[in-house]
Structures are given as structure tokens and as C-alpha cells.
Image (cartoon, coloured by chain):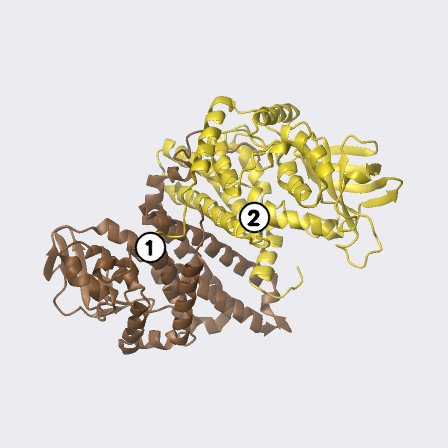
Chain colours: A brown, B yellow
């Protein structure tokens, strides 16, 4: 039992954070939102060089994985910097395409950043279909690789997520799809991204309320302000162990719990961030909007709150106490 | 590749779990004990502590020489998971074990430990806390009860209130003002232990929301405390009391096993009621929060093992468990419908208890101030 990131894992997070800070992601995001993918693709290559996508790809196909804990570490940083692109979907694609003979054909390109993959969500849209080089549709009949030009882009509440309709058509890659396993990985990556989004919103808002003065004092000295931020931090810090616990176990119910908690905490932090920034936070021009809108979008992506809760209720977390939660009577007194 | 983040228990901890489970299966009372906030229930819970202690299960994390098993923090977490999953009784000695004992381990003398800890472990001496006063609640440093120097010790004068368990307990510990001339309110305070049946002590029980005497007022009229019952240096009481609240209380006041068991039981209740959709989100959220609380504790335990101090982090812990406890019990009562109104229902006592959670052990407003100022670095302001 040692439920703590080690020095290498923390250093990996630190180096990604430094690289993404230097990359000026707000400018990249704004280009991406307009359909100009040049700087986003360059950033994608650097993220791949840092080994991020390789964490979902086995070594024999050019990766370093599978290493879900390190992948989670990385995706928290990607979320913290609101990096655009089909990030979680590319991780999911590495699982969907992970069996021979597909693995040999596709995985090296995913690991080294040559390919950006999107995956059609059930009944939903494929994110960034216009930028993706691989457009995958898992369907009852098998896994399809889209060969037609992507459909028109629908605007998301998060302008950096460019949604396209994607039908199961094109090249049939495989008759059977490891969809549940892929979904677990996409969901884990999405949860990690959401936690990073929430942490960035908290940092930015703390900086704002320390700086912004009203009635002659920083507004961060008011209890009404402090308490909202304390609640946001508490929600984020209790989502964090669920996230890493899910990365260790990869059990669907644990991953669902992590997804729900990280997204709820990030969204709650977004509401607090918006409110405490006041009117400036309610503008598209101010960079805070890049994180605010993502917190909303990720909440429903790859597992709505209701879907996640259903998985938890069906499982019950009985293994969390050696397989016997709920067997006997519970709390009596203190 | 081997990952450093490891959630598997050591073989020793798994054996420890199995031993605890086996003992509890044999000894946990088949029918629930009466409420520990009644005279009859208090006695029954005291007897249960003796039964636990007879086989050294009452204070597993203590050193063996005081009746414990030298369990690590991870071992303690495992024991607590088993304890609450087995439906074992509430712990009447909790105040002493989670607040006074850590203080004695850190600041007491070996003589004090040898004298105070073994009867605490068996339930022979049950401890109450004596912090709050009528004019000193959240602003605890405003306390006015005096400790006046006398030959060989101190005389206590004043009034304490909201003293949990004091209606039936044997002894109490708390802070008293020994130097009223000290320049700051939190200076000149001394940490003392005294007997609730000593001459000069009047205990007036107070009925909590359901009328049970869960706490009491203490009137102190020149109560003599010998020097050997002062913990640490006179005048250093504030620092001593606060270090115990930050480090230990955050992790050990409310164990994750307690909430995991309750959340599991809530899920069973929900299923027994036909899995109603209106409550499914709240039941799921209770399960998730209990699991989050457990994993947060494992992560904190790993940091402690690495030599970190938890300090203000424990304020997030207190916010989280107190809100979880309340939400969990409110959901249970809602699921029970008309039955949920009954004062002697299976969830009623726990519900009444959970209502106090956001108030005691430092109100949640004080905890949020600590999180904001000490973890987020926001400027101090008027409370």
C-alpha cells in the first residue's frame, strides 16, 4: 500500500506543465476554434514526443504502455492547459485498434502523433472530426474507419470542441469491437482532463480574488468569497484520489465514479470561477472562458452523470472493504 | 511495468484484516446496544470496550505496552473497515482515544501515559472534552475559565459547556487560562485533566435535539488539579491542543470504514425499497463520497509515512465527512418515508448525530476559513 505518486511521476507532470505553459495554449485554442489547426498540430506533436499518447500503446507498437497512472498524470496537465483536440478519443482509439492486425497498422502513428483519432460517441457527435486523421465508428456490426469527408462542423458550447456527425460507414476494420475497454480508457482520460480544468479554474480564480480590490481590500478577504473557493478546492481534492484509484484498478465502476466526481467538481469550480470573476468572466474575450466552457462540455462527454451513477449503483463498491460493504448493520452513534 | 501507486494491502495487513473479521464475527452483539447517550447504553458500551480490550482490539494503533497492537495507519484503516462493516457498536471512548491520547503521545510524560492510557483502552475511564465556554465557541481562544496556581497544582474556576459524553463520563481534559496577563488571547493557556466527580465539579447534563443527554455543562468551583495532570508546559496549551486537532483528528476522528459501511447499508435500503429512481443519484453519490473519503485517507496515510504533516488539509477532511454523514442519513430517512419519522428507527439516532457534525470539532465555517487562508493563501479578513 503506497497510494501516492512517486518522484518520476511528479517530475513528468512538472515537465508537461512547463512545456504547456511555454506553448501559450490560449492562442492555440483560439486558432483551433476557428478551424485553423496548424499550431494545434504542432503542439500535438510535442505532446506525442513527450510520450503521452504512447502511454496507451504497448511497447511492441512504438509506445510505453499501457500505463494508465502516468496517462492520468499527463491528462490532468492537458486539462489544466485546456489543450484542444481529440485527446481522450485518441487514447480510446489506441484500445479500439489494439488487437492484431490493426495494432501494427495504426498504433505507431497514434503513439508518435502522426495521427489524431476521433471516435463517434453513441448517439452523439465525433469531436474534432475536421482535424482528425482517423475517424472511428464503433457499431454493433463492427468498427468502421470513415473514408468520406467529415460532415459540417456543429459548434459546441466549448468552441474548441468542433463536433461532426459520423456514421458507421467506410472501411470495416474489424467485426468485433472492444468497446467497453476503450470506453473505460476514454472515460479515465476525460476525468483526468476535467480535474485539470477544475484545478486551472481554481488557480486563476484565487489569483483574481487576491488582486481584485473592492471596498479598499482584496475581495479574497471576504468570507463569502473564501468559502466558495474552499468548497471548490475540497471537491477537487476528493475527486483526485478517486481518479488515481480508478487508474490503478481500471474497474468500470471506479472509473465512472472518478468521471462523475472530477466533472462535477470541475463544473462546480467553473460556476464559482465565473461568479467570482464578475462580468469580465462572462466574456468570450477573457481567457477564463476557455476553461469555463470546457468544464460544461466534459461533464456530458463519454458518460453523463446518470450513466456514471448507474454503474456505481450496480457495483456497490463492495470490494472497497474486503468485499462486504452493506452486509451488516451500519453506523450506530459515534 | 510496475507502477508506484499501489492500492494493494500488504500480506500482514490482510492477515490483520482476517483476524479482526474473525474476532468481530464472534463477538459483535447480535442486537444493537441501547443508545450510548443514555445511562443504560453508556454502561453497555463501556462493557463492550472492556470486551474489545480483553483481546487487544480497542486501540489497535497504540503501542502494545498500553494495550494496542502497534498497527500502522494503513492497519488502523483496515481494522476500522472491518469494525464498521461488522455492525459493531459506536465507540464511547472516542473523545479520549482520538483527542487526548495523541496529545499524551506527543506532549505527555511517560508517567502520564502509563497512568492514563491503559484504563482509557479498557473503558474503565471514559473521557469527556472541556473546550467550549458560553462565550468561547468558534473563537475558542476567548475562553475565560481560570487555572489559578496553588500549592502542588492548580485550582480550576469557571464554566465549560457542550462537553460531549460528560453526563456519564469519568474525567475530562481541556484548556484553562493560567496567565490572564498574557498579551495575546491564545497565550497563557494550560492543558489540564481533571475528574468529573472531583470536589467542586458540578455536571449539568444537556439534552441534545432528541432529548438524550449527549453533552453537559460543567461548573468548576476551585477544583484542585495536581501538577502531574498538566500536559506539557503551563502556558503552552493552545499549541498543544491545536497540534492534536490538525494532525490526528483530521485522519482518525471519523474513519472511512464507518462511512463505507453506512453507504453500503444505504444501498441495501434503497434496493429493499425497489430501487426508486428519485433517490438513485443521492445513493450513488453517498457510495462515491465514501469511497473518495477512503482513498483520500489512504493517500494521506502515504504522505504521513513519507514524513509529511497534514495540518490544514485535515480541514478539508472535516468538511467532507460531516457533509457526507448528513447527506447519507437524510437520504436514508427520505427512503424510509413515513417510517423515517420514527424516533427509534434504525437510521434515526445516526441522523440526529450527523446533524451536529458541521458544528462540532470546529464549525465548517472555521474549516473553510482555514482551507482558504492556509491552503489557498487568501488574505485574512473579518470572520
In terms of secondary structure, where does tag 1 sit? Answer: helix
Question: Where residue A202 appears, x then y in whole percent?
Answer: 48, 64
A206 lies left or right of A282: right
Q: Relative to residue B311, is residue B23 drawn left or right?
A: left
Disc number for residue A173: none
Residue B60 in picture, x, y percent from top left = 56, 34
Q: Is residue B69 above or below residue B40?
A: below
Q: Residue furthest right?
A: B151
Q: Secondary structure at mark 2?
A: helix
Q: Quadrant of the C terminus of chain B?
A: bottom right
Label placed on residue B318: 2
Question: Which residue does the image show at 47% across and 33% down from the upper left?
Answer: B16
Q: Chain of mark 2?
A: B
Regarding residue B377, the answer to whether it shows in the image is: yes
Give the Cα separation between the discs numbered 2 and 1: 31 Å
- Count of residue discs: 2
Residue A235 in the image, given as x and y percentages of width and height: 47, 54
Q: Residues within 10 Å of mark 1 (few under 14, many from 20)?
A: many
Q: Position of residue A7 (x, y in %)?
A: 45, 59
Q: Give the camera-side residue of A5 and A116.
A: A5
Residue B75 vertical placement versus A302 (above, below): above
Identify whether A192 is placed above or below B96.
below
Residue shown at 45%/48% (left/top)? A2
Which residue is tagged 1?
A: A68
Q: Quadrant of residue A240?
A: bottom left
Q: In this view of the protein, which residue sits in the foreground, B15 or A116?
A: B15
B108, B337: nearer the viewer: B108
Residue B213 visible somewhere in the drawing:
no
Asked if residue A120 lies left or right of residue A272, the reply is left
Amino acid at each position: 500500500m503506497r497510494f501516492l505518486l512517486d518522484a518520476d511521476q511528479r517530475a513528468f507532470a512538472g515537465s508537461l506543465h512547463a512545456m504547456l505553459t511555454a506553448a501559450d495554449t490560449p492562442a492555440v485554442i483560439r486558432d483551433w476554434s476557428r478551424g485553423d489547426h496548424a499550431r494545434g498540430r504542432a503542439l500535438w506533436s510535442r505532446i506525442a514526443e513527450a510520450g503521452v499518447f504512447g502511454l496507451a500503446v504497448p511497447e511492441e507498437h512504438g509506445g510505453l504502455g499501457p500505463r494508465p497512472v502516468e496517462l492520468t498524470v499527463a491528462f490532468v496537465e492537458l486539462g489544466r492547459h485546456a489543450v484542444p483536440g481529440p485527446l481522450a478519443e485518441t487514447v480510446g482509439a489506441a484500445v479500439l485498434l489494439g488487437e492484431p492486425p490493426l495494432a501494427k497498422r495504426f498504433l505507431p502513428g497514434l503513439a508518435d502523433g502522426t495521427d489524431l483519432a476521433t471516435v463517434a460517441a453513441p448517439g452523439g457527435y465525433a469531436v474534432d472530426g475536421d482535424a482528425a486523421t482517423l475517424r472511428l465508428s464503433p457499431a454493433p456490426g463492427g468498427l468502421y474507419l470513415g473514408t468520406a469527408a467529415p460532415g459540417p462542423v456543429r459548434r459546441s458550447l466549448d468552441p474548441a470542441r468542433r463536433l461532426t456527425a459520423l456514421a458507421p460507414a467506410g472501411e470495416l476494420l474489424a467485426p468485433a469491437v472492444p468497446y467497453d475497454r476503450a470506453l473505460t480508457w476514454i472515460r479515465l482520460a476525460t476525468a483526468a482532463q476535467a480535474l485539470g480544468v477544475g484545478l486551472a479554474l481554481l488557480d486563476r480564480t484565487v489569483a483574481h480574488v487576491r488582486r481584485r480590490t473592492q471596498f479598499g481590500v482584496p475581495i479574497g478577504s471576504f468570507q463569502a468569497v473564501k468559502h466558495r473557493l474552499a468548497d471548490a478546492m475540497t471537491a477537487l481534492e476528493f475527486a483526485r484520489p478517486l481518479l488515481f484509484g480508478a487508474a490503478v484498478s481500471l474497474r468500470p465502476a471506479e472509473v465512472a465514479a472518478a468521471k462523475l466526481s472530477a466533472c462535477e467538481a470541475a463544473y462546480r469550480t467553473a460556476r464559482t470561477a465565473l461568479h467570482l470573476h464578475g462580468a469580465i468572466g462572462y466574456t468570450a474575450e477573457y481567457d477564463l472562458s476557455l476553461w469555463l466552457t470546457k468544464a460544461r462540455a466534459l461533464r456530458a462527454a463519454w458518460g453523463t452523470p446518470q450513466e456514471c451513477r448507474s454503474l456505481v449503483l450496480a457495483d456497490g463498491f463492495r470490494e472497497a472493504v474486503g468485499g462486504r460493504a452493506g452486509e451488516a448493520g451500519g453506523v450506530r452513534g459515534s | 511495468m510496475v507502477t508506484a501507486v499501489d492500492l494493494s494491502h500488504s500480506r500482514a495487513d490482510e492477515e490483520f484484516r482476517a483476524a479482526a473479521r474473525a474476532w468481530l464475527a464472534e463477538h459483535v452483539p447480535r442486537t444493537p446496544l441501547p443508545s450510548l447517550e443514555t445511562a443504560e447504553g453508556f454502561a453497555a458500551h463501556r462493557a463492550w470496550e472492556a470486551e474489545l480490550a480483553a483481546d487487544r482490539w480497542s486501540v489497535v494503533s497504540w503501542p502494545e505496552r498500553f494495550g494496542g497492537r502497534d498497527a500502522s495507519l494503513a492497519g488502523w484503516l483496515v481494522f476500522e473497515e472491518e469494525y464498521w462493516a461488522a455492525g459493531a457498536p459506536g465507540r464511547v471512548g472516542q473523545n479520549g482515544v482520538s483527542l487526548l491520547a495523541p496529545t499524551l503521545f506527543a506532549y505527555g510524560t511517560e508517567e502520564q501515559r502509563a497512568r492514563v492510557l491503559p484504563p482509557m483502552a479498557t473503558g474503565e475511564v471514559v473521557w469527556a472534552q472541556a473546550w467550549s465556554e458560553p462565550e468561547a465557541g468558534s473563537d475558542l481562544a476567548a475562553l475565560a475559565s481560570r487555572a489559578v496556581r496553588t500549592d502542588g497544582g492548580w485550582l480550576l474556576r469557571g464554566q465549560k459547556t457542550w462537553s460531549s459524553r460528560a453526563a456519564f463520563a469519568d474525567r475530562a481534559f481541556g484548556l484553562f487560562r493560567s496567565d490572564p496577563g498574557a498579551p495575546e488571547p491564545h497565550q497563557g493557556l494550560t492543558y489540564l485533566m481533571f475528574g468529573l466527580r472531583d470536589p467542586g465539579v458540578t455536571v449539568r447534563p444537556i439534552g441534545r435535539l432528541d432529548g438524550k443527554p449527549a453533552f453537559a455543562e460543567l461548573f468548576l468551583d476551585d477544583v484542585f488539579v495536581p501538577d502531574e495532570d498538566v500536559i506539557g508546559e503551563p502556558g503552552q496549551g493552545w499549541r498543544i491542543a491545536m497540534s492534536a486537532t490538525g494532525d490526528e483528528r483530521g485522519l482518525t476522528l471519523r474513519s472511512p470504514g464507518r462511512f463505507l459501511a453506512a453507504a453500503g447499508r444505504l444501498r441495501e435500503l434503497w434496493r429493499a425499497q425497489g430501487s426508486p429512481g428519485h433517490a438513485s443519484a443521492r445513493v450513488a453519490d453517498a457510495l462515491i463520497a465514501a469511497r473518495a473519503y477512503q482513498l483520500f485517507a489512504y493517500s494521506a496515510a502515504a504522505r504521513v509515512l513519507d514524513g509529511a504533516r497534514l495540518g490544514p488539509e485535515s480541514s478539508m477532511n472535516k468538511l467532507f465527512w460531516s457533509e457526507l454523514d448528513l447527506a447519507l442519513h437524510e437520504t436514508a430517512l427520505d427512503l424510509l418515508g413515513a417510517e423515517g419519522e420514527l424516533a427509534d428507527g434504525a437510521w434515526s439516532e445516526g441522523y440526529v448525530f450527523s446533524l451536529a457534525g458541521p458544528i462540532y470539532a470546529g464549525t465548517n465555517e472555521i474549516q473553510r476559513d482555514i482551507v482558504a487562508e492556509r491552503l489557498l493563501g487568501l488574505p485574512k479578513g473579518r470572520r
